[in-house]
Amino acid sequence: MGLSLQDQLLKAGIADKKQAKKVNQEKRVKRKKNKGKKKTPEINQTRQAQLAQAKLSRELNRQSNQEKEKQEKLAQVKQLIEENRLDLGKYEAPYYFKVGKKIKKLYVNDDITQKLGRGQLAIVMLDSVYEIVPAKVARQIVDRDPDSLVVLHKPEEE
């Protein structure tokens, strides 16, 4: 078997035993210092980058899913309102209600006014238009989008 470079240098007389011993000692000290550390920091950096990318990807997926869920709920609210709204085109008696700091009005008949007051009907908003729907439907709407509900009185206990 061939001689190591150190042995060859010693044999050729280029280096002496004292220098060889010193180099061996430095190698041992360096190995001891690095014993607890990872040998390839590049792998750690790559792994950390992969973990960061995976975390970012999960966060983006979560946000995307939340946005899809919100859109689905809004579509359900729109469908509930459109299927269950009352036709208010032919009434002349105004019904006043408060929205924020403003007073709004819808034209209804006396029967609808009484049902609104008893909590049997509710006023909801769809695309900046106020609609009247049954209270049961209004509760379903509130479960999906609480901001759509404008007026729902508590039913009177009998």
Image (cartoon, rainbow, N blue to C red):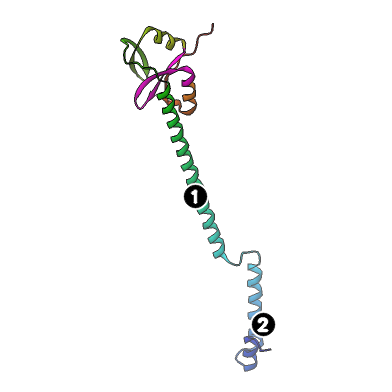
- Examine the structure image and report whether residue 116 is included in the region drawn in magenta: no
Task: Name which residue lies at 53% across and 8% down.
Answer: 157
Of helix, strand and loop, which mostly describes the magenta segment? strand
Element marked by disc 1: helix
Which dot marks residue 38?
none
Three-letter code, disc 2: Lys
Task: Name which residue lies at 53% across and 61% down.
Answer: 46
Element marked by disc 2: helix
Q: Position of residue 47 (x, y in %)?
A: 55, 59
The quadrant holding residue 130 is top left
**Magenta region, residue range:** 119-137
Give the vertical position of 157 relative to 142 (above or below). Answer: above
- Examine the structure image and report whether residue 130 is included in the region drawn in magenta: yes
Name the one closer to the observer, 44 or 99.
99
Local packing at callout 1 (Cα closer than 10 Å; few below 14, some 14-19, many 20+) is: few
Q: Which residue is mark 2?
A: 21
Q: Position of residue 9 (x, y in %)?
A: 62, 89
Which dot marks residue 57?
1
Q: Nearer the viewer, mark 2 or mark 1?
A: 1
Task: Name which residue lies at 52% across and 52% down.
Answer: 54
Sequence-first disc among 2 and 1? 2
Three-letter code, disc 1: Ser
The quadrant holding residue 74 is top left
Image quarter of the N terminus: bottom right
Give the vertical position of 40 relative to 93 (above or below). Answer: below
Name the one closer to the observer, 45 or 157.
157
Q: Position of residue 79 (x, y in %)?
A: 42, 28
